[in-house]
Image (cartoon, coloured by chain):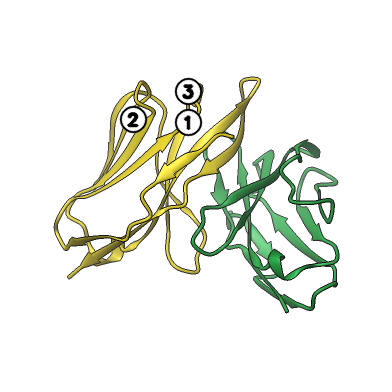
Chain colours: A yellow, B green
Amino acid sequence: QKEVEQNSGPLSVPEGAIASLNCTYSDRVSQSFFWYRQYSGKSPELIMSIYSNGDKEDGRFTAQLNKASQYVSLLIRDSQPSDSATYLCAVMMNYGGSQGNLIFGKGTKLSVKP
Amino acid sequence: DTGVSQDPRHKITKRGQNVTFRCDPISEHNRLYWYRQTLGQGPEFLTYFQNEAQLEKSRLLSDRFSAERPKGSFSTLEIQRTEQGDSAMYLCASSGGYIQYFGAGTRLSVL
């Protein structure tokens, strides 16, 4: 059973701080990794995708991937109250080289205090 | 393009009734996915289609669940003889590559 693990939180940070969200996965052959943001009662919204080891930056967001350690993280700089949401880590399954479904973690609830 | 569309947004039904949900993907996307999400959990994969072919359905929760995508465009997810445990958010996503875009979901409540 392929698994994605996240700390469910809640993670509370003050406004302007860096929020650090972590995720580990069990399937060594996984190649594609995603962070989705989900506001309460809404559907998941893609924040970042990452496919290679190292860092990928997009605005205030940085995704970090370490395939050897089977670890993915998301850093949110200058956190804002509007960043308060649940962050879902997802790993893509591959079927014979074709993209398949996503396996999600349970999500980490982030709260940014003004 | 208006994104992935799901209908209805909310469905309340009595136990034992059948329900059907519809998903219209982003028009140029050939892959369509169904997920279920319960409170406090991440989305759980159910099934997916590439064009009209259903490529993975072993994760459908029971034989009461079925899905179709008859012409490779919209898809339907049917739950027969609903049970209270079926109450959840049912999410549809579509993709033309690696990124999956989600619809707003259908929230099912089984009384």
Q: Which mark is residue A28?
A: 3
- Report crowding for label 2: few under 14, some 14 to 19, many 20 or more residues within 10 A (C-alpha): many
Callout 1–callout 2 Cβ contact below 8 Å: no
Badge 1: chain ID: A
Task: Give the mark, 1 or 2, whose residue is nearer the N terminus.
Answer: 1
Question: Where does label 2 land, which residue?
Answer: A65
Give the spatial CA distance, label 1 vs label 2.
14 Å
Residue B54, x across and y down, in percent: 78, 38
Q: Is A43 on the left-hand or right-hand side of A110?
A: right
- Does dot 3 land on a helix, a strand or a loop? loop
Residue drawn at x 55%, y 48% as measured from the top left: B101
Q: Is B87 on the left-hand or right-hand side of B76?
A: left
Q: Nearer the viewer, residue B57 or A5?
A: A5
Which quadrant, please, contains the C terminus of chain B?
Answer: bottom right
Residue A85, x across and y down, in percent: 36, 62
User: In the image, which is nearer the foreground, mark 1 or mark 2?
Assistant: 1
Give the spatial CA distance, label 1 vs label 3.
6 Å
- Does dot 1 land on a helix, a strand or a loop? loop
Q: Looking at numbered disc 2 in the image, what kind of residue is underneath it?
A: Leu
Question: Where does label 1 land, which residue?
Answer: A26
Badge 3: chain ID: A
